[in-house]
Image (cartoon, rainbow, N blue to C red):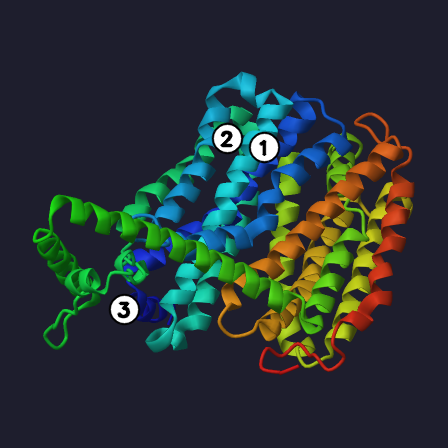
Amino acid sequence: MAIRWMRRMGGSFGASFLWIVSLIYFTQGFRSFVWTAVSYQMKDILKLSPSSSQFMFSIAFFPWSIKPAYGILSDCIPINGCKRKPYLVIATVLSLIPWPVLGLISSLMNSHNFLTALLTMQNLGSAMADVVIDAMIAEAVRSERAEFAGDIQSLSWLMMAVGGICGNLLGGYALSSFRICSIFLLFSILPGIQLLSCAFIKEASSEYPDIVDLKNSNLQERLYSSTILPVGASKSEALRRRKKERNHDCSKLSYGEAEDVKEKGSLALSLRRFQSMRSAIYSLYDAFKNPLILRPMAWFFFSHVAVPNLSTVMFYYQTQVLHLGASFLGASRVIGWFGLMIGTYIYNQYLKRMKLQRILMLAHVGLGAVNFLDIVLVSGLNTRLSIPDKYMVLGGSAVADAINQFKLMPFLILSGQLCPPGIEGTLFALFMSINNLGSSVGLFYGAALASVLGISTNSFRNILYGLLIQLFSTFIPIGLLFLIPKEATGLASEKL
């Protein structure tokens, strides 16, 4: 069954396209392999406090908050006539370079500033690759292959999940067997393969259609005359013939006249690209200021900002106080991935017809329950009830990821419902960026709270107060659910 499905997909999209999609999403999930090592580098080698580490992470992940910029660039400014392949190559190079540099130059790996800069560069490349591959998928499933849209998206999520499970399982083992610099070098193999795979991507040139009309109609007629093609001629053949015809007509012009035409064509092309970028930005602005779009996105943003993220603080507590090893923490994150899958299944089976306001309210109540589990763990109440710390961590990880999926799924569905025709891709990227920006601000908030409470590597006496603040903050967004449309449900087919 699965083999037949893959063959059907391969026949529609081509093996090279499915390979690059699978590789990029697998790499996105497998990033946990190397980012676990980054966490230990900050804690054990750089001796950073929990708040300092979390602050560095919030800076490093900021490129995920400006994803629409990458989409507008690739849509409006082709490189050598191509909109996707060159940007994917650039993104892959950006995500590749930091790892061998950090692995080979220990002075950079042990510098706070250089480490933050290189990690930010790596996330810039990963975020750009994510935007470009999503655009390639959207173009690939358009028109005659639209029936495969769900299949290609399922393949993407499947490969990311497989990458996440493998990355977390191997990440803990690698930390106990290799030096951190070696882990950086090992991970660089994946973006290296991705860079080589870019050579097999096929993309039709769009350089010539981008050129706007010239003022001189005679020269325009001589340079851009139509080409009559035989029936069944391909687009690439049309472009080759048009280019050959232009070169032939240019040879009839004087040198000065030809140079003038080239200069006007270049100017017209630059103007066209500028106008295209301006139009895309204005379209985004006009769509986003619509209250039906602005209010729900404001709620999702505020739902992250209002709650301090103390994940790095809990990582320090689990390793420094509970003495949980890297292998166990990696296994707990694998449980989290399975929790995410279970959460997706429960949502699709039982919650998708429920009103979004109620789903989001239940999600935040559930997140409050997860925060309460952390309070039980830190207070030691679980040991008095003969519940081992490891069981608390494993259970909390699985439940937290499942509940977060209850919140993410409505966000994705509501974003799809709100996107107006014509700018779906860019506006959806903007929605995801707002979500990511809210998460980054939540990390800043958590880092500031940990610093104010004096939580450090050797002092966790005030961590309980931080968790209590996090618990009460979790319920604040519930009071703002009036921003979510009342009639919206979890069904993607429902219209607002």
Write down the quadrant of residue 466 in the picture: top right
* Amino acid type shown at disc 3: Gly
Observer-nearest of 280 and 43: 280
Task: Tell me what residue is drawn at x 45 percent, y 58 percent.
Answer: 275
Other-residue count near label 1 (Cα within 10 Å), few / some / many at <14 / 14–19 / ≥20:
many
Q: Amino acid at mark 1?
A: Ala
Q: Which residue is mark 3?
A: 11
At label 3, counting other C-alpha atoms closer than 10 Å, the crowd grade (few under 14, some 14-19, many 20 or more) is few
Q: Quadrant of residue 294?
A: bottom right
Residue at the (82%, 25%) spot, across then down: 458
Label disc, if present, on residue 167 of the rendered structure: none
Q: Is residue 402 left or right of residue 77?
A: right
Q: Is residue 97 above or below residue 272?
A: above
The residue wearing badge 1 is 37
Label 3: state its secondary structure.
Answer: helix
Classify mark 1: helix, strand or loop: helix
Q: Which residue is mark 2?
A: 183
